[in-house]
Amino acid sequence: MYKKENLGRLKKMSALAPKVMEAFWAFDKAAVADGAVPVKYKELIAVAVAMTTQCPYCIEIHTANARKAGATEAELTETAMVAAALRAGGAVTHATHALSD
């Protein structure tokens, strides 16, 4: 399913829905811009979310962006462990729905 060359189709999407895609890219850029939360932390958050949602495109893109923003291998590893803990915690808490009172 994951084919990096599919990202080339983003240009086609931009041509087919220019206003929406322009708004999306502006929002995307603003969301990870430096602010109260520094870029490095925002990119690490994005990595954790990408790992949790299991999006290989986002994992690759935001890992590279986090590295560019100064993230270390240790920080990326800890970020992955936070994502793993949340996925595992989600499974544990959802398991409560399987139990009867």
Image (spheres, rainbow, N blue to C red):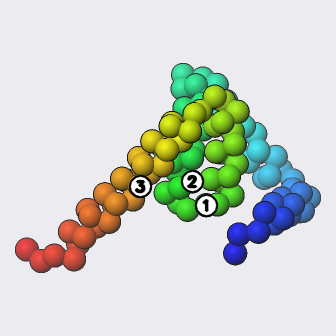
Quarter of the image holding residue 32?
top right
Residue 65 vs residue 100: left or right?
A: right
**Of the residues shown, which amino acid type is indicated by label 3?**
Ala
The span from disc 3 to disc 2 (Cα, nearest Å) is 11 Å
Q: Earlier in the sequence, mark 3 or mark 2?
A: 2
Residue 30 vs residue 87: left or right?
A: right
- Depth check: give the residue in front, 3 or 23: 3
Quarter of the image holding residue 93?
bottom left
The span from disc 1 to disc 3 (Cα, nearest Å) is 14 Å
Measured as percent of width and height from the top left, residue 25 is found at 76, 44
The structure residue drawn at horizontal position 82% and vertical position 46%, both measured from the top left corner, is 22
Tell me the number on the disc at residue 55.
1
Where 47 falls versus 95 (above or below)?
above
- The answer to whether marks 2 and 1 mark residues whose Cβ atoms lie closer than 8 Å is yes
**Of the residues shown, which amino acid type is indicated by label 2?**
Ala
Q: Earlier in the sequence, mark 1 or mark 3?
A: 1
Q: Residue furthest top?
A: 36
Q: Which residue is mark 3?
A: 84
Q: Which residue is mark 2?
A: 50
Quarter of the image holding residue 69?
top right
